[in-house]
Image (cartoon, rainbow, N blue to C red):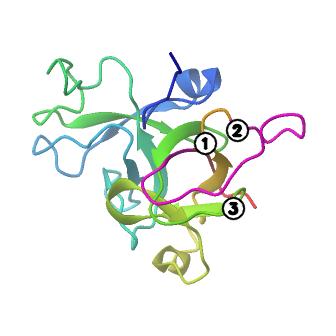
Amino acid sequence: MTFTPGVGNPATDSALGEHIEIWNKATGGGSAIPMGDVVVRTSTTGDCAQCSTSSFGEAGVVARLFPNYDATTATGNINTDSSNQVAVICGNGAKVYVTASGSIPAGSRVGFGATGKVQAFTETNTSIISSTFKVPIGVYEGHYGESEQSAGTPCTDATNGQVIRIRLGAFG
């Protein structure tokens, strides 16, 4: 049996410790944000919401961790429809699995994509208008099992809908 990480899974042990925060949801107790979705926290309210291509602000990824809501068992006490908060993997250097929106070249920078996803970053992304926030939001490092090391399996381009590993932060 081959392990395949799900979106929202931390890619490193450090993502489990130093990179987990609890953020308030912009929707309050109105709706859950799916695990693995990229969220953006705004400077005006400090609340987060699922990202879109026009988002700008601090980026994070809804963590796939207990006690997050588990849609299979309908258990958990954070990020449920009625909760006001969500557990987020965030901060420079955090590595996490997310879903690609469109094609992303190996090793390239990523920005906010459609509906909680990431896309290849371009200078024309709407988020470039703000100099207060880190843009791009991270770097695409590869699929599960691909390595940045010369001795490992090389990173390949991502296509729409694939689960990929990113390193959060304004790198590149």
Q: Position of residue 47 (x, y in %)?
A: 31, 50
The answer for how far apart the CA atoms under marks 1 and 3 are is 13 Å
Quick one: label 1, few (<14), some, or many (20+) residues within 10 Å? many
Taking the view exactly as shown, the residue that stands out farthest to the right is 150
| Front in this rendered view, residue 3 or 35 | 3
Residue 7: which quarter of the image? top left
Residue 119 seen in the figure: yes
Quarter occupied by residue 45: bottom left
Name which residue type carries label 3: Ser
Which residue is outermost to the front? 1
Instruction: State the image coordinates of residue 134 (x, y, percent, origin top left).
Output: 59, 62
Task: Looking at the image, tell me whether mark 1 or mark 3 is earlier in sequence order.
Answer: 3
Earlier residue among tags 3 and 2? 3
Task: Please determine whether, in this image, residue 16 is positioned above or below residue 118.
Answer: above
Mark 2: which secondary structure?
loop
Assess whether mark 2 and mark 3 are in contact (beta carbons under 8 angstroms): no
Q: Residue 99 at x, y = what percent?
A: 44, 49
Label 1 residue SS: loop
Could you give the CA–CA distance between mark 3 and mark 2, rounded to whole angstroms?
Answer: 15 Å
| Cα–Cα gap, marks 1 and 2 | 6 Å
What residue would you read off at disc 1?
Answer: 143
Mark 2 sits on what residue?
146
- In the rendered image, residue 151 lying in the magenta stretch gets the answer yes
Q: Residue at label 3? A: 108
Magenta stretch in the rendered image: 146-164
The three-letter amino acid code for the residue at tag 2 is: Glu
